[in-house]
């Protein structure tokens, strides 16, 4: 950490900060510059140190040097993590593909989708049973009945089930049915839920919140890892910006950036990331080219009749076409897609 | 709702959409324009209608005309809501002032703060017992012991207690100690928590998420209102933008905008909204001038030693000064501040 | 245009707005909904009509139905525009690649770069002679001497020259040397410059401003097109968001979105779009997969010594590697890259 | 500057960077931390040093310690600058108020407005003769004829004239008529224009670009100051964020933040900052309370008929009311407003 003093900081203020740094168990190293003095604080830090030093007298700013996440960091573990959950594998040469409807609606719908996406090469089935919805008046999901239907779809197709859990008290129940617990963007900083998912031992797909920094995403993952669960997949699903022509802005540089910072695998969600069916294909190809370890896509037998997210959902034929095209791009970047 | 067709939409597509609109129980009114056709859908809508129509063939966009929130809307209830909780009243001529430390740390700290802020004119005490922290390695709060200390502070000073609840399973416990349940920005879309807070009947301070639109904030409030709890205060605490010189960007136009859309009172948080102690005073005055019904401010007897948020926390003297200055501004806009 | 009235709008206000609409030469069509009245305004609009109606009494909002750009619209011209300028062709099956240093520094540097990028498959040379710099104390470019050096590089390699023009009074001079006038992000709404570039008849590479909407970008292009110059390439180079781990956020969905709205070709700039050399390769591949018609990349024989933008600049070997990898991805999406 | 090395940086890389730092004429001070090494670079920096060092081998990041602007900095000149131009004074105890229409439309309109705003307490008249418009099909201003009309309004009322200049080649002409050259948000980084305005010696109102950081704003001001013109007013007029309920987001913390960083006075534009007439009053009061040194407001005798910006324009009575209310708030913060 570098404590940067203000230009007019007095000797007493500098001395005070040196003592504060040493009081935290760090070594203080004073550097007198041409226009101001900085104090390098050397040693093992804790996150609150920065906050604490920032309010000191004569301090202009405190610049952290180390990333605040530990277990997620590629500095700690260089080999890439491969997350395996039933038929799904994410993080290796083969790109995992999670596909299915936004919401589980009924048995016919989920079975038809499961068969179709499996046929086209998907390696896991997504489907929401618990739906966090912006409006209290929107369809909120079939809940446990939806989980039952997902189970039947797994039995019928062998596909691993990825489904969202929205509260810590539901984790045990959902974990009985799911191969992967999805934690949605709205809950990325629901720490109680992160801890419960961490303790469950079930693999977790953690979606980035629409205004979360990458550091915040990695610290959220850290809650899960720190609870003893190493099977975390990070998911980029778009951020909120001034752009209004897409539902969110999908910043694909997240993929190589995360690959440089963490050993955890990275999944991309072009459905939420664009919010429009007609943009999903090209952004799926772009995600593969950018190095995505996995994809998650919304597919429904009849998107126009979907109970949620129809405007960004592919029908089964569109999905099969995208898979065929993605397979070619994957090969061009030395990856592969099943099917 | 206005369904806007693409320029080349065929007669069959237009007819299809007319039938879809009528299938939703709405009247369809076709308007043939110079370059494209639009269909006005008249009648009582539900939020999923828009989504559903958007994926129709030949549809360019669907433009909603009505706001999706109902109970929170000033179109439904014109008189301003005044929320009262113990010594705190927010929404009337007098501006409610909630002040106290980010975290409850120990009895001495919380009592000293409570006495000081009461003396300066605060009408409620804030203090976190359950702290949602970005890093799992940061101080997470004293939990129930912190609630105990808040209770003692209330007994000693008469100040209403405002404290955060971070999970639905904690609502009953926190509600035993708190006069106001604070729902933090990270949990604004934790719907399970919103519902539990709604059922508790205790007044709620709902903070805007850093990337939430105003519509999303009002829909989150709608979850609480819809559960039967009318005592909701909305809190603007800053949004995430490209600006890095402040911790968040505090968009004060939220205050008059909300006043035009909803009858719920609006509280502003200049501490989180700026993230720097030296900016808090001027932004507090600006909040009052913009029409804020309440203020929430971080105050600590010794901010440099605070276990969290010290860099944006006022000491007791700074708080008293700000209160004195705010009182003058309040008078200039025909409001008042106690003390 | 749809004029949406407020819920309590009076008959007189509605009548007033009908007259205002008709006064603009449009037909007014009143639709009385369940909760409010809307007036559809039918006929040929001009951009100021929306502004003008919005300030009318009892008006809640005015919703435009038509895009405000005309000549750039794919509704007006369905066939994709191919821009050709010397050795550069952008918009056809082959992806145009513009490569070179941020700034022209000296003859040796620009010639070495030109030979290297040509060898690797670039079809045009970029290099700044007039540099708009954030700080007045930064290197501002070699100006006309830089243009001279670019000319020599063209003579030596046959590569078309793409170079920035920063002021309308420079257009004639720069046009004498350049095959393509680059208009930088800072100048996207410098209308005098757009008009001058339009009148020059020379092909234009128009970069999106970091906070410009796509509609604003297309309207900026419209200034050039309207001045009689059809040879416009649009360039996505990243937008400003809350993300700080990249210099800008590169929103690749711009590519398919623009392809659906305009016939103009789309170039992507992964150098500025990421701001870090180590992210450029993956984002170049992603750009190709997303459907980019062209690429613009910063290349320098020794980036560490570059006078500007070294941190996002490729060396010649890195560029050649990226070209080889991009060629494979291009083939996988049925495009091609020279070389 | 602090050069932070990557964790695995080799001794050779560290040595290389030490030599690079010394090659720039700085002293290098190596600090070996628990997990990585940092090199403090001490001495007089130039802006390109940071860029240059960032691309070095083994470098994780380069952290600047000093602000890159010089003349604008309050570290260089502690006393606040007061800009005086005819009847307008901005930066002292009295708050300067610039009011008038978006566009000069005709003599009757500009004279009526000038008389009304003067009567209500404005100290300068605004009015656009050269209008930079997003669409080429919008009204572009009366140009020199508009300047003539502004001159007549000044003769009739004594009010200083503030009017926009959009290109360097127009500066001489506009400077003949204007007391203050306004540089609009779109042109904040039009450096040729900034230099020309700097050389003109006429006072400048420099508007912040909608995605400009404060540092970029101050560096833009630095172009004007560096050209020998000390009479610069900075103007906050709103930034582009994800918020869509206001035209821009008005971040009032800019006011106290700028006051801590620069001696230049700060003007706020609540008209563009909100984009809606009904929000202007409260945000004007908030601007005054936040410490604004000046205000700029759009006023028109009949906003519904205004040729531009009618939706955010006050009529004369609304302006007079806001002035009366602002006067009270100004007094409450020990400032004053004429009238």
Image (cartoon, coloured by chain):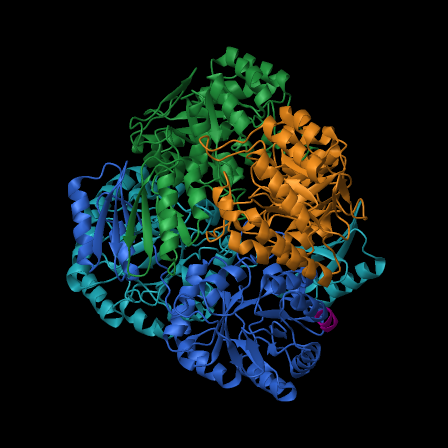
Chain colours: A blue, B cyan, C orange, D green
B140 vs C187, left or right, is left
Q: How many numbered marks have been drawn onto this rendered protein structure?
A: 0
User: Residue B177's quadrant in the figure?
Assistant: bottom left
B84 vs C250, left or right, is left
Q: Is residue C35 visible?
A: no
B151 or A71: nearer the viewer: A71
Main secondary structure of the magenta stretch: helix
Q: Is residue C45 visible?
A: yes
C178 vs A186, left or right, is right
- Spot the residue most to the right: B11
Magenta span contains residue A317: yes
Q: Position of residue A22 (x, y in %)?
A: 18, 56
In the picture, which quadrant includes the N terminus of chain B? bottom right
Is D199 placed above or below A167 here? Answer: above
Is B208 placed above or below A204 here? Answer: above
Is C188 placed above or below B207 here? Answer: above
Is B196 placed above or below D268 here? Answer: below
- Spot the residue most to the top: D155
Q: Position of residue A59 (x, y in %)?
A: 25, 45
Q: Position of residue A283 (x, y in %)?
A: 64, 60
B213 or B125: nearer the viewer: B213
Q: Position of residue B276 (x, y in %)?
A: 32, 47
Q: Residue at x 70, y 27 (%)?
A: C176
B184 vs C223, left or right, is left
Magenta span contains residue C80: no
A20 or C258: nearer the viewer: A20
User: Residue C213's quadrant in the figure?
Assistant: top right
Q: In the rendered structure, which segment of residues is drawn in magenta?
A: A316-321
A2 or A115: nearer the viewer: A2
């Amino acid at each position: 950490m570098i404590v940067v003093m203000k230009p007019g900081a007095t000797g007493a203020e500098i001395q005070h900060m040196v003592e504060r740094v040493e009081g935290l168990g760090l070594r203080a190293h004073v550097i007198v510059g041409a226009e101001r003095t900085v104090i390098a604080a050397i040693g093992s830090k804790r996150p609150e140190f920065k906050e604490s030093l920032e309010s000191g007298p004569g301090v202009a700013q405190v610049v952290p040097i180390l990333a605040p996440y530990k277990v997620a960091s590629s500095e700690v573990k260089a080999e890439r993590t491969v997350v395996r959950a039933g038929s799904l594998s994410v993080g290796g040469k083969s790109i995992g593909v999670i596909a299915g409807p936004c919401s589980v609606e009924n048995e016919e719908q989920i079975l038809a989708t499961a068969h179709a996406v499996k046929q086209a090469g998907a390696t896991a089935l997504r489907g929401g049973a618990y739906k966090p919805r912006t409006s209290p008046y929107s369809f909120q999901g079939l809940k446990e009945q939806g989980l039952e239907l997902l189970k039947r779809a797994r039995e019928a197709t062998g596909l691993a089930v990825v489904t969202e859990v929205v509260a810590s008290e539901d984790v045990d129940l959902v974990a009985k049915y799911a191969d992967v617990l999805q934690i949605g963007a709205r809950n990325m900083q629901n720490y109680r839920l992160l801890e419960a998912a961490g303790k469950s031992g079930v693999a977790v797909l953690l979606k980035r919140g629409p205004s979360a920094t990458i550091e915040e995403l990695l610290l959220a993952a850290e809650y899960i890892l720190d609870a003893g669960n190493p099977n975390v997949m990070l998911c980029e699903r778009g951020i909120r910006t001034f752009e209004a022509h897409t539902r969110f802005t999908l910043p694909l540089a997240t993929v190589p950036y995360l690959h440089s910072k963490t050993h955890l695998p990275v999944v991309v969600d072009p459905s939420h990331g664009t919010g429009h069916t007609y943009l999903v294909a090209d952004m799926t190809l772009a995600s593969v080219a950018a190095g995505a370890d996995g994809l998650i896509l919304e597919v429904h037998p009849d998107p126009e009749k979907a109970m949620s997210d129809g405007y960004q959902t592919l029908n089964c034929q569109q999905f099969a076409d995208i898979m065929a095209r993605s397979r070619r791009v994957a090969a061009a970047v030395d990856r592969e897609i099943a099917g």
